[in-house]
Image: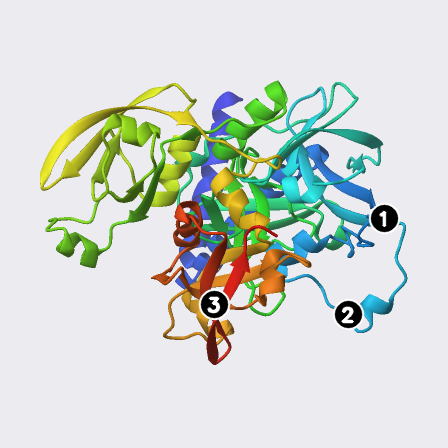
Amino acid sequence: MKTSKISSFMFLLLAFTATSLLLPAPVLAQKAGLESLRQTGLAFREVAKKVSPAVVFIKVEKKANPLTGQNPLNSPFGEEFFRRFFGQPPQHPGQQKQPLKKRSMGQGSGFILSPDGYIMTNNHVVSGADQVTVTLLDGREYKADIIGTDPPSDVAIIKIDETDLPFLRLSDSDKLEVGDWVLAFGNPFGLSHTLTAGIVSAKGRSGMGLNEYENFIQTDAAINPGNSGGPLIDLDGHVVGMNTAIFSRSGGYMGIGFAIPINMAQRIREQLVETGSVTRGRLGVYIQDLTPDLAESFDLDNIEGILVTQVMEDSAAAKAGLKQGDLVLEMDGKKVGKVADFRNKVSFTPPGTKVKLLIQRNGKEQTLIAEIGKQETDDKGQPTESSKLSKLGFSLQKLTKDLAEKFEYQGQNGVLVTEVEPGSAAERAGIKRGDLIQEVNRAEVKTPADVRKAIEVNKRNSLLLLVRQGESTRYLAIKLDE
């Protein structure tokens, strides 16, 4: 009987093989392609079943400010959503004539980190909310407490009072490679538990002007308003990032989305859960990436390393002997990479930690030992260097090629004004959104860091700015004592 079964199997196998050999090659290729697509679809289906129960829909509510008469969340998603997704808050005809609402609403996404109800989301989803409501896939609804927020990284942790919840496991985002499949989960435009698929199109994106600390994963998985705070998932169903923004010149999805690497977010989460705030390390230097032109000017054979442009007095860098013009090559035996990567590494190093810096000075390498200091922050968690800028009432972004085309600043150098706070010193001085700041106190500026540096060393009670507004250029003075 056993021999008969084997013989039957061999006959069927031979018959199938013979039939396949009779099929034309294009037909076989088509069948193989369809089968591959079916297997991919099955993989996505399994990930969706595994992940969706741990993805949550977040609704936030806040009272209107009785002093300013402003609704902090004056759209279904809040102004910060539109800044991150569309570049500006929504504008509607006759908006200022509309009656003031007593309460305003916003919404976003999040994902459960542990069975006892800890949830990760974006800071801009829950920032300033009086009430946060979380809805699960099965319809259960909970009021959530804000455990802690970190505006510089745009990470927030909230918690619901429940146990035995479905939760997501975290992957190692450092191992993610360009070309890897990723799935974005969330609630775009309030459409609950939506899944989109794509690949990692780039890593280590910085200089976007969204966060103080940036190291974004770039993906073509569709991300839209409402996806903020949702997880970016690998094919194993593990979290590799948190969706936070898109790049768009039209106001709609254009195939480029950004997610915070989960390794970075997890470091923030640990501190927020433990203390409710984040403590960062500080070296006390202004730095810039080394370009081929700078390398040639400094008689360097390669462009690896980070150039020190200024050392702050009494800082960890100054005490270690770091000097202007030094080239930082390694930190604790590892190459420093780009400026954004190095800033992130220093910021996540606990204050008091001694690190070994390999530098190059005047063509010779030497090793310095620096004891990392503590980054002083304002009441919103922003570094004090940045808070001085925010107190003036405007936000800045590096002028990229795309922004130069959008605002018609081709061929110009400077820093773009992305936001001006109503009633601020910047607004009183005549600065407007879309202006290009080209000089501060008669010194040329090309990055937001250049502006912060000029503010830091300023000894007068005003700042003199050379500002380009459209096709005209003029000097504006911002009073610092108002």
**Vertically, is 16 above or below 435?**
above
Q: Is residue 194 visible?
A: yes
Label 2 sits on residue: 92
Where residue 381 appears, x then y in whole percent?
58, 35
Q: Which of marks 3 and 1 is nearer the N terminus?
A: 1
Where residue 223 appears, x then y in whole percent?
61, 53
Label 3 sits on residue: 436
Q: Quadrant of residue 123?
A: top right
Q: Nearer the viewer, residue 197 or 470?
A: 470
Q: Quadrant of residue 82?
A: bottom right
Q: Residue at x 47, y 44 (%)?
A: 214
Say which of marks 1 and 2 sits in front.
Answer: 1
The N terminus lies in quadrant: top right
**Vertically, is 404 above or below 274?**
below
Q: Quadrant of residue 186?
A: top right
Q: Can residue 35 be seen in this view?
A: no
Where residue 426 appears, x then y in whole percent?
58, 59
Name the kind of residue labelled 3 in the image.
Leu
Mark 3 in CB contact with mark 1 (< 8 angstroms): no
Q: Give the secondary structure at mark 1.
A: loop
Q: Earlier in the sequence, mark 3 or mark 2?
A: 2
Q: Give the secondary structure at mark 2.
A: loop
CA gap between label 1 and label 2 equals: 22 Å
Residue 66: mark in rendering = 1
**Vertically, is 131 above or below 428?**
above
Residue 313: mark in rendering = none
CA gap between label 3 and label 1 equals: 34 Å
Where residue 158 appears, x then y in whole percent?
70, 30
Name the kind of residue labelled 2 in the image.
His
